[in-house]
Amino acid sequence: MATKEEGKTVFDVEAANVLSKELRDAFASGKTRSYEWRISQLKSIVKMCDEHEEDIADALRQDLSKPLLESIVYELQSDCKWNLGWDFNTTRSEFTNEETSNSTLTMVKNSCTLAIKELKHWMMPEKAKTSLTTFPSSAEIVSEPLGAVLIISAWNYPFLLSMDPLVGAIAAGNAMVLKPSELAPASSSLLAKLIPKYLDCSSIKVVEGAVSESCALLEQKWDKIFYTGNGRVGRIVMAAAAKYLTPVVLELGGKSPVVVDSDIDIQVATRRIIVGKWGCNNGQACISPDYIITTKDCAEKLVDSLKKELEAFYGKNPLESKDLSRIVNSDHYARLTNLLDEDKVSGNIVYGGERNEANLRIAPTILLGVPQNSLIMKEEIFGPLLPILTVSKIEDSFDIINSGTKPLAAYLFTNNKKLKKQFLMSVSAGGVVINDTALHLAVHSLPFGGVGESGMGAYHGKFSFDTFTHKKAVVYRSFVGDASVRYPPYTRGKLRL
Ligand code: NAD
């Protein structure tokens, strides 16, 4: 699999070539196509989650200081009693290991459970209508696995973003390799340890590593590449895929706006914005609110409410709060503090701004009246900073959103039916939530993915199966009814028919 160089194991292009050949051979053997293989692998993932829930939570804590509750809700168990309507005042210390292990299903487990339940139905050929031209005939759409696929995942939800695409690739009957992110080393190493133990290691492989390992894999021919991460690397992935005309799914990010109208329940809106921003990995989530747009009249009220609720959730000294993740590494810490320190916005901080370089913590920070041409408004923030822009009338927010690239998510808080309609018509985004944030991620009957620069392709639920499947068009004919009209010679008489 990998060569030894000065005592170090190297995963280079040659090793990647050997690995991709092994996966092609495994796929060619036909075993991954069978219903039984797919079900057995999906069941093994459920078992793996059950038996290693604590190890997974521990790896997430090591990589990101992720609060236990957040790990449980977002990466471990999505249907736990605390989900959606959880009590925001409950602290981490109130959750015991027993409560954690009492969990029934995980986000990943939910995906497995759904696939196990629906797989027979998903795999079944779908009848299609035929036309007079093909009479007599029948037709169907056959769901065919693609072959050997490459999954490259990101650090911010290192377990979920690795395992969820894997579930789709398995359900669709492919062989696959997963390359987790090097920026979440504890999760990466746990996945590399557990996956071969629980899953068929001749058809499902894990390669740990960073850019060079990723590039070695990208040099190979794959039948699909599923990449989660930033747009700069997305372009590298797409360029590499072009060599073999390999289709790609790019799960990227962007600046996800929140538009706040004045006719709302401000406390409920504020709490929902906070949980989507700081409650999701301290803003290091692809669908985190990136900035708010509200009217000049509403801004002060909104800031007051945000301050009040933030203090209620994270206390007077949020740098000490156990309910906030830390910044993933010193590069991202420097990137974020640089955004805060820019002259154009450094005077606009109305709440927070505290930081501690030693433990990579940045407090929830609100900036009001930020100019549109500031650095913080040019790039995806991906951290605990939340700028608020003000407009004279709320409809002006559409132009601001549309002046940037299409976001992964867009949120609107309003009771105004006309505004909801206008928003849906005017704003293009991967997904939209009205009167909440981030929740579309948890609805498995919805496709999850971006549009424009926030990505291409989608997954979750049946969409994950479809994303790793080729829909093969099949027409069946018999030997009767062999109309001679389409055979030469093309006489005038045949044209008149
Ligand atoms: P990252 O640094 O973990 O990189 C993602 C993957 O790309 C890693 O496995 C890494 O090894 C690989 N990689 C990095 N540089 C590479 C290169 N030059 N060539 C080949 N491979 C390379 O993650 P990130 O990019 O910092 O992730 C954050 C971004 O991802 C944000 O923009 C966020 O919005 C987006 N994101 C999107 C989703 C989604 O589902 N749409 C989910 C999470 C994160």
Image (spheres, rainbow, N blue to C red):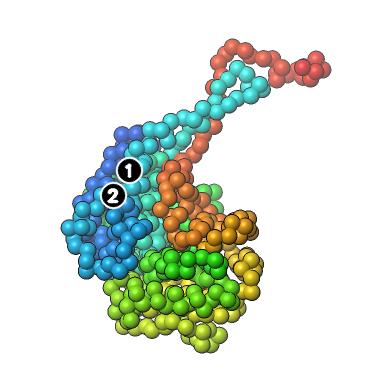
Check the image and report above or below for 4 versus 467. Answer: below
Q: Which residue is mark 2?
A: 105
Q: Position of residue 54 (x, y in %)?
A: 21, 59
Mark pair 2, 1: CA separation: 9 Å
Q: Secondary structure at mark 1?
A: helix
Q: Nearer the viewer, residue 129 or 94?
A: 94
Of the four image quadrants, the one with ligand 1 is bottom left
Q: Amino acid at mark 1?
A: Thr
Which residue lies at the image location 55% right of the left edge and 22% below the top edge?
A: 138
Which residue lies at the image location 64% right of the left edge and 66% below the top edge?
A: 395
Which residue lies at the image location 27% right of the left edge and 42% below the top edge?
A: 43
Q: Which residue is mark 1?
A: 113
Q: Amino acid at mark 2?
A: Leu
Count residues near mark 1 (Cα–Cα under 10 Å), then give few for <14, some for 14-19, many for 20+.
many
Specify the quadrant of the image occupied by residue 462.
Answer: top left
Q: Position of residue 487 (x, y in %)?
A: 70, 18
Determine whether, in the image, residue 379 is placed left or right of residue 197. right
